[in-house]
Amino acid sequence: MAGAVGVAGLRNAAAADNQQAVESPREPVKFTWWGNHSWEIRCGKYVVLTDPWLTRFKTGTYEPEGADPTTRLVSKPEVIDRYVSTADAILVHHGHYDHLPDVPYVARKTKATVLGNETHLNLLRALRAPADQLSQVTGGEYLPFKGFTVEVFRSLHSCGGERHQFAFPGTRPGAVPQRPRTIADLVEGGTLAYVITIGGLRILSLSTAGFDPHALRDLQVDVVLAAPGGEPGVTDRLLQTIKPVKTVIATHWDNFDYPLDKPAVDWGGLDKLRASVAAAGSSFVKVDHLESIVL
Ligand SMILES: [Zn+2]
C-alpha cells in the first residue's frame, strides 16, 4: 500500500514540477549534433546526451544490399574524447549498432546515469558498461535530475518495405547475454522516446521515425528531434498526434558510412521530413555535423 501512496505522491510532484518547468524562465539550451541520433543538449553546466555514437564504422546500411550483419563492433576512445566532455544523463533509445556501442565508454568517462530498458541495459552490461550507473526504465517514468527532468515514453522503431520490417529485431531480457561482437548482436530491444525539460524548454527525442501514438497523444513540447524514414506519412501522423510544435530538428539523416568530421551526407530522407514539418506549420531546423544551435 505504501507503494500506491508513493506513486500518487510522485504523480503530484511530477505535475507540480512540470508546471514549474513550463513557467520557469527560459535559459539558452545548446544542441550539438554528433551525427546519427547523437546529441549533446546543454544548459549551463547540465548536459544530457542522446544515443552517443561517435566512433562510426562502415556497415553499408544505406547501400542497396544493406548492412553486413558480420560487421565487427568497434568503439574508439580516441574518437569519443575529441567530442564528449561531461554529461549527467545518457538516454538510450534503442539497442542498434548505430546507437549503443560507445555508451559504455561515454558512461565511464562522464559518470552519467544511463537510462534504458531491460534489453538495452543487458546489452550494455555485456559490453562492460559500469553497472552501478544503469537505470532501468520502461515508459511512464518521470525522473527529476539536477538541472533538468526526463520523462520516458514507450516508442516504436520505424519499419519499412513490403513486410514492414526493421533490422535485427529481438530482445535480451533476463540474464546478461554474451559479449556482443557484431552489429547483428545488438538487437533493437524495444524503443523508447524521452522528453527532456531543460532551461524551460521541453524537447521530445525520437531516435527513429517510429513512435507510439497512444503514448504521445496530445503531448506538449517545444522541440522535436525527428528522424526521416519509416512508413509513408509517419511523420505527418506524429505531428498530428502531439500538440502543434514550434520547432522540429532533423536527426539521424546522415549516412554514417561517411565521416563525422566532414559535412553530413543525406541518406535520402531529408526532403520528405522537411515537407512534413512544413505541412504541420512547424519550423524545420537542420544542423550539420558538429554544429550547434541555441534555442
Ligand atoms: Zn535503429
Image: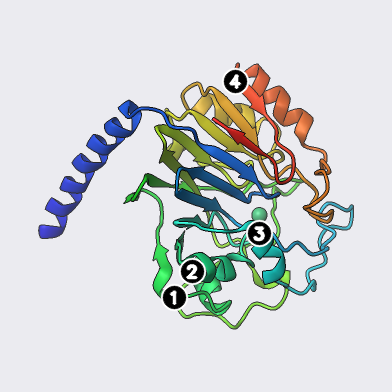
Badge 4 density bin: few <14, some 14–19, many ≥20, Cα 10 Å: some
| Amino acid type of the residue tagged 3 in the rendering | Trp
Q: Which mark is residue 238?
A: none
The residue lying at 82 percent from left, 40 percent from top is 266
Question: Helix or strand or loop: what does disc 3 sit on?
Answer: loop
Q: Residue at x 79, y 64 (%)?
A: 57
Q: Nearer the viewer, residue 88 or 18?
A: 88
Residue 199 figure quarter: top left
The residue carrying mark 1 is: 131
- Residue located beneath label 4 in the image: 282
Comparing 30 with 51, the one in front is 30
Q: Which residue is mark 2?
A: 121
Badge 2 amino acid: Leu
Residue 218 spot, x, y in % from top left: 42, 28
Under mark 1, the amino acid is: Ala
The image shows residue 70 at horizontal and vertical percentages of 80, 74
